[in-house]
Amino acid sequence: MKKLYILFILSAFSASLKAQTTWGPPFPLTDSLTDNVNATLSIVPGEMFQSDTVYMLWERNPDPASTGIYARNLKTMAGAFMVAAQYGAHFRHPRVFARGTGDTLFYFSYETDMNGHWDIYYSAFLKNEVAVGPFPFIQSSQNERSLNFGNQQSFSWEKEGSIYARTSTADTVKIASDSCLNPVQSDESYVAYEMVLGSDTGVFYSKYNSSTHLWSVPFPADIYGSNTHPTFGNDSYSQINDSYLFWQHKNGPNWVIKGFDITDLQYLSFNNFAGYNNMSPSFCYVEMITGDHTAPLFHYSTFASDVTGNMEIYVNNIWGDTVYSNISEYSGIDRHPQLFNNLHLFGWGLDNQLFDIWESYRGGHWQLWGTTRDILSGEKTLEGAKSCILKVSPNPFSDKTRITCSMPQSGSVTFDIYDLSGKNINTLKGFEDNAGNLSVNWDANDAAGNRVPAGIYICAVRAGQTILHAKIMRH
């Protein structure tokens, strides 16, 4: 009976994928007043019969001198909040690399120049949506960038033009040099990267031998023209090990997307818009989890193309589907789409969403926009921001400021004040004013009654599952 039930679900699943082609309308995921780029997702699995929680992490410029890592809960669509930052320093390239236990939801890494050169650090993201860190991950006297994970014990990065890798069974080793950059990793077996070859840029890869614990010499996937943006896809803690490598290639007037099967050593057929620029490929699997077994069902692809005269975002089912859906619907500049999924059948959680998130240049700033679809029904599953408003006045302030918020739900509300290192300075209890808003006065004191120094602070307002954040400056 169980086998028949699984076959029935698979048949309905396959039919629904063929029948539905629509995505929900795009909407903004970040503010329009700062630059927001380089998004990634963390899927936190729900319990049985409960939905997953999805967090988006990305880079944001809170002020001209700094770049921080911010997060947003896409399940509640509460406001953005800072998880790693320091005034005058830059925190970039966030990557989630491990699920947590106990009070920790997940761990994420990033590169930062807070010590005068680029090092790689990590933080723990807790259930109360506070990030603990930063903790050193990879440090040296040289610049280290672009950390990517095959799993939580296998990762690779770039240091001064060389590619390094470390696995659970082998020490750190240099696997490629000679002007290399932008490594990407697929499980513990493959690392791909760009290599500058005179006037050309090639895409190469190295393979790990689990028997000898040695890495191969670099193998070329393409060495002619310009080859950039290699990717193995995004799989949100996928259990599938895949050897399909894709990248963007230019050896003529336009960019095209190319693919290579590293296992079978053959190039893949990929449909591009002929005669136009096709850039920034991203891929993910639609998986089915049945108990302890995970199997791929379909591959989805997304990329940016100027087929309409504007750089817009397109998506399709990669194998045999030549119909591309324009999901950005914006006559401007859209770039760097990222596909993620959290389809879980017969396992923990009942979510089945595809997420596509991209960068959109609007109003003089890069914003993050996105849309979703339900893999089974084709319906839009992610809603826009809730009607929550948080105001701070005066801001900047010297002696006292009032923090006021309006939220759609009632209940207990707390106002937590943090410094830029993530340390909790004070927790204040709000009161309801005559207009029905919840407010609190902060006199620039910490929990012990001591005056805090001048600087930037973060106020986190919590009411149930809704969390709002505001930046407060004391001069």
Image: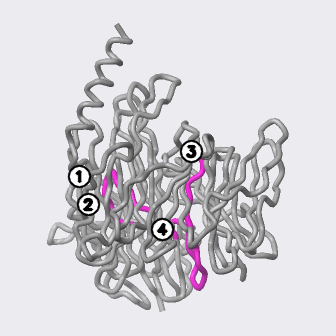
Element under label 2? loop
Element under label 4? strand
Element under label 3? strand
What is the span of residues highlighted in magenta in the rendered image?
A: 69-98
Residues marked 4 and 2 touching at CB (< 8 Å): no
Give the amino acid type for the residue marked by disc 1 in the picture: Trp
Residues marked 1 and 2 touching at CB (< 8 Å): yes
Q: Nearer the viewer, mark 2 or mark 3?
A: 2
Image quadrant where residue 137 sits: bottom right
Q: How far is disc 1 from disc 2 in space, using C-alphas?
A: 7 Å
Q: Which residue is mark 2?
A: 327
Q: Is residue 129 above or below residue 256?
A: above
Element under label 1? loop
Rendered location of residue 41, percent (x, y): 45, 55
Q: Nearer the viewer, mark 3 or mark 4?
A: 4
Q: Which residue is mark 1?
A: 23
Q: Is residue 89 magenta?
A: yes
Q: Earlier in the sequence, mark 1 or mark 3?
A: 1
Q: How far is disc 4 from disc 2 in space, using C-alphas?
A: 19 Å
Residue at the image point whose x is 75% and y is 56% from the top: 165
Q: Earlier in the sequence, mark 2 or mark 3?
A: 3
User: Which mark, residue 99?
Assistant: 3
Rendered location of residue 157, percent (x, y): 69, 62
